[in-house]
Image: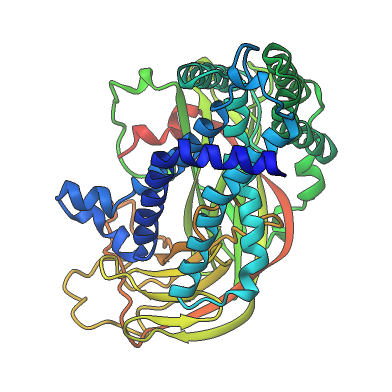
Amino acid sequence: MNQILHIFKKDARRHWPEILISLALLALFTRHELHPWQNSNAFSSLSPYFFILAGRYITPATILFLAFLIIRAVQGESLVGDRQWWVTKPYEWWNLLAAKLLFIFIFISVPLFHVHLLLLHQFGFPILPNLSTLLLTQLGLYFVLFLPALLLASLTKNFGQLLLTAACILLVGAGIAWLATKVPSGDMESPPAIVESFQDFLLWGSVVAVPVWQFARRRRWVSAAALLGVLAVNSLISVVAPNAKTMEREYPSVEAQTSPARIAIRRPAEMTGRRNANPWSDAVPDVYLHVPITVSGVAPGTMVMVDVMKITTDSPQDSRWSLGWKYQHVELWPEDQLKSLSYEVARKEYEKVKTKPLHLHIELALSEYQEGDARILPVPAGRFVDEMLGICRIDPLQSSSIQCIKPFHAPGLMATFDPQEFPCPGHRDSYTIQEDAVSHAWEFSNHYSFPDANYTPIADYSIWFRPVSLLTDLEAKPQQRSKSLSLCPGSEIRLARPELKRQLRIQLDLPNVRLQDLVESDWQ
């Protein structure tokens, strides 16, 4: 224990300038987080000073410098080589590791933990009910920030080597990402859950085990080879392991007539506008197919989400092909009548068949959500407190949204607002087709079993109300751009917690169509 304290005190004396800078950055970070709604208005200021100190640069600068402080502390007794002065001292490796962990705990974890406590207290959120989540968030920070910085510092001799190593890691990561784009796969394709859990165990286990091994043996190339080997095995498992049939298991197939939403595809001939040659289209690596659909039959108090879509084509001249499932996240509300889906296709594949008549088989994976604990929320003037939403107010710059803050994560919610029932005075001067349409807001819950490694315990989010899409006289003239709806004090919104009722798949057919007629970028 005496040796641990001796090393700790030596590091504190040696790195006091970096410690002071990190505490100063934490103070600026605290000041920044105490005014989340002012930060969102920082972009309206032309002052560089205000933009920097009240803008979005404080948090990244603080995170990078905390990682830099860890690196400096670990490289104070470099683990690379065998000719450092400290190896002649009676240092035990576990004492050295414990001293470095104590340094991280005292000068990084403890101040950051107190900043989080201060933020919760200043906003009036209770401490004790959130204490366990706050401690788990600190644990998440160790895995996401502290341990990776410790890993890089233990494998490099100085800061120059570390920058070179980090650059190589970024290049390798970019190369792997580029190769992944060349392998055709859908968004929902993934290995079985047990394989993914094993991959996570390998990844995070290596982040913990490699620094410990390096402290114990100081064999950089063995440690680096072990880390690269684990990463290679992890990548190999992703390629070799068969993809789980996620869609078939989670989204059973049903007839389109029994779907919670009646969905029909509008043929290209029904779309309005004129073809417009785009001189830059050939330079774009991907093409987006525009699939307009009509919607009806969604039950009141229900929202149907189009999660993913898959297009399979076949024709007498061409073989059957598909590019897998692609994310959509398109909301279908009871009042919706017209929506648009988008499907990404590689230009190389698109150019082969864009002018040929094809039969398209379009599969949609749907999730049906129902309102739970629905209630009417009157919106008061100024700030108001709601148990579900947190602390909220109408956005003074975007009156179609409500700004809220809540501990750790935004809640899942579904909300409805009818501007015809609660018109705001002074907002009738530029009437358009959809100005008075019923509007809805949807928020996914970002809360998982293990909290994210958040650097702040305060989640700042907005509830955006968007009008439903109605069928209008689109064939006669292009639709006008509708003005944003306005919320004002006294407006009432219907607020509910979304409850997942069921998930299913349906298939729709679009025969005898050319892909070039579905390219959205060519229409105006």
Which one is in front, 293 or 303? 303
**Front-lying residue, 257 or 143:** 143
**Position of the C terminus by quadrant:** top left
Residue 198 lies, with reference to residue 337, above or below; the image says: above
Q: How many discs mark residues in the rendered view?
A: 0
138 to the left or right of 121:
right
> Residue at left 29%, top 51%?
55
Left/right placement of residue 31 relative to residue 50 reads right
Front residue (pair 415, 163): 163
Q: Quadrant of the N terminus?
A: top right
Q: Return the x and y of residue 159 as percentages of the image width and height.
A: 47, 22
Report if residue 286 is visible in the image.
Answer: yes
Percent across and percent down for residue 217 are 75, 20
Q: Quadrant of residue 234?
A: top right
Q: Could you say which is closer to the camera, residue 119 or residue 157?
A: 157
**One can see residue 477 in this view:** no
Left or right: where 48 falls relative to 306: left
Give residue 314's quadrant in the image.
top right
The residue sitting at 27% across, 82% down in the picture is 424
Q: Check the image and tell me how it is coloured.
A: rainbow
Q: Give the image location of residue 415, x and y in percent.
A: 50, 73
* Residue shown at 81% from the left, 41% from the top: 193
Where residue 205 sits in the image (x, y, percent)? 76, 34
